[in-house]
Amino acid sequence: MKSTNRVLPILLFFIGCMGFSQTPEQQKMIDRALKMRDSIMECMNLEEVLQQANELEKRNDLAKKTKNNKTSPSIKTANSDDKYWRNTLASTNNKILTNWHKGEANLVFNYGYDVRKDKVEYIKVGVIKENGTIDLNPLNKVPVLKPLNNFKNSNTFFDIHNQDSYHFNNENSGFKLNTYILVYQNEKQIGILTVGNSEKVTLNLLTPGDLYFGDEGYILSWAYVDEACSIKANENWKGDLSNTGNPLLIETNVTYDLNFKPGWNLVKTEVIGKYEFPNAPEEDRSRYKIHAHTIVDTIPNEATYFFRSTVE
């Protein structure tokens, strides 16, 4: 703009001479000056327009930021991993599911499947009240059981690699264990209920591809036996726990110290310690160091109930 300010007065001087007689050379100079003037004025107008547009854009941006700060504050979500909270409700310390709007529902323990009736066989073990309060107190006998020693072939945690590590006492006693409770309403399953202290653990230990993740915490399982019996195991294992084909060689320790009394028992499965692989794919982000399975007398007071609805 400074060079334009210097040139323009000179041009105006030449243009001001147009009212006097001009030689052909002077007329050519005047014509060139007029063209140059028009060109410079166009540039000056264009620059002014651009400046005005820039100022307007800045004002608009500032207005948008101000509006957003007032009406749309930044929301920090505690539950950043959507897969663990999708279709999930959690309880408060008073055993009430937050935002429960499904009405009363039954809590049931499944023990079999009737092929002829195409129906899950179960017994009632509790209820979710209309306000979301959970009343879980299994008392009924489970009518169909399998021998305890079948556990080595049906262990849903798949954390013992050498089946010789299992040691059973009274191995032919009837036994049934579930890591979740079914939620039924009008004879239709609407979800499952798990109990623990971590939304991640209570989903990982139900998901075949996520069983080896190292998210720490515990999940509770319900077991029913018809006679006193026990499961013992202690395995130190070293090997590949990769899901993606890229080897993850780690060492794990898994212990089972389960002394069952006749009737209902609570099993606590705890994930302790983890290996972290920040550069690995999501499926191999971490691996556990220890799985410890023990018996607990009651559901811990700090435990959280997680309702995960059935996706239709």
Image (cartoon, rainbow, N blue to C red):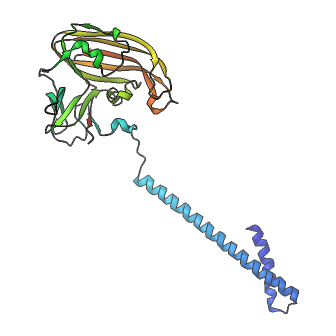
* Residue located 44% across and 52% down the image: 69
Q: In this view, does 17 lie above or below 248?
A: below
* Residue located 65% across and 71% down the image: 46
Q: Position of residue 233 (x, y in %)?
A: 33, 10
Q: In this view, does 310 lie above or below 163?
A: below
Quadrant including the C terminus: top left
Quadrant including the N terminus: bottom right
* Location of residue 191 by image quarter: top left
Outermost residue on the front side: it is 116
* Location of residue 208 by image quarter: top left
* Location of residue 12 by image quarter: bottom right
Q: Is residue 134 above or below residue 71?
A: above
* Residue located 20% across and 10% down the image: 172
Answer with left or right where residue 49 lies relative to residue 169. right
Q: In this view, does 99 lie above or below 196?
A: below
Between 139 and 109, the residue placed more toward the observer is: 109
Between 226 and 10, the residue placed more toward the observer is: 226
Answer with left or right where residue 1 lies relative to residue 230. right
Q: From this viewpoint, is residue 243 visible?
A: yes
